[in-house]
Structure formats: C-alpha cells, structure tokens
Image (spheres, grey):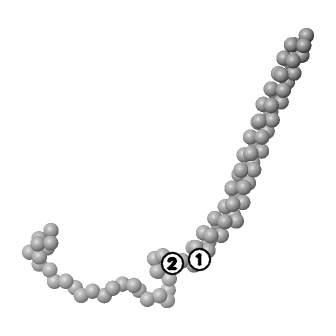
Amino acid sequence: MLRLVHGRMMNILRRIWAGWKRLGGLIGDVVGRLVLTLLYFTIVLPFGLIARLTSDPLAVRHGRPASWLEREPVEGTLDEAERLS
C-alpha cells in the first residue's frame, strides 16, 4: 500500500516538475529576448547612429579638400614596362 501511494506521488511530482521546466523555459526565452532587445536599443543602436552621423570614412562630404596627390604623368615605353616585370 505504501509503495502504491509513493509511486503515485512520484508520478504526480514528475508531472509537476516537467510542467515547471516547460514554464521555466518559456519564461527564460521571453526574458532573454527582452534583455537582448533592451541591450540593442540602449547600447548598439545609439552607438551606430552616432558613428554614422559623425564619421566620413570616404571623405566625401562637401567642404573638405580632396585628398588626391598630384602626380606628373610618366612617359613610358614598352621596353621600360618589360624591364619592370
């Protein structure tokens, strides 16, 4: 009789434990997505916007002098080109 009650109690506890693990997994998924979303909108997004608005990696904005270097044209012959290779 005691074994029967113990077995039923263990079965009930296993079901409760399985449901609890499922609920914990769902809560963990929601909290994880929420934390990552908040992290993105509070750190990554402002940094990207500031970097995009303040930088000009190609130096294409108006008002800046071109950074081209002036160079004299080279008069080359076919013999000189063959010598370089």
Question: Above or below — where is 9 with respect to 39?
Answer: above
What residue is disc 2 on? 56
Q: Is residue 78 visible?
A: no
Q: Nearer the viewer, residue 57 or 39?
A: 39
Q: Which residue is painted at 24% across and 87% down in the image?
A: 72
Question: Above or below — where is 43 with respect to 29?
Answer: below
What x and y, as percent, mark residue 71?
Answer: 27, 86
Outermost residue to the left: 79
What x and y, as percent, mark residue 64?
Answer: 47, 88
Q: Where does the C terminus fall, quadrant-wise? A: bottom left
State how far apart marks 2 and 1 are (Cα).
8 Å
What's under tag 2, amino acid-wise?
Asp
Q: Is residue 30 visible?
A: yes
Q: Which residue is painted at 72% across and 46% down in the image?
A: 29
Q: Which residue is painted at 77% across and 40% down in the image?
A: 24
| SS at badge 1 | helix
Q: Where does the N terminus fall, quadrant-wise? A: top right
| SS at badge 2 | loop
What residue is disc 1 on? 53
What x and y, as percent, mark residue 45?
Answer: 64, 66
What's under tag 1, amino acid-wise?
Leu
Is residue 17 left or right of 45 when viewed as pictured?
right
Q: Nearer the viewer, residue 31 or 79?
A: 31
Q: Which residue is painted at 39% across and 84% down in the image?
A: 67
Question: Above or below — where is 24 with respect to 46?
Answer: above
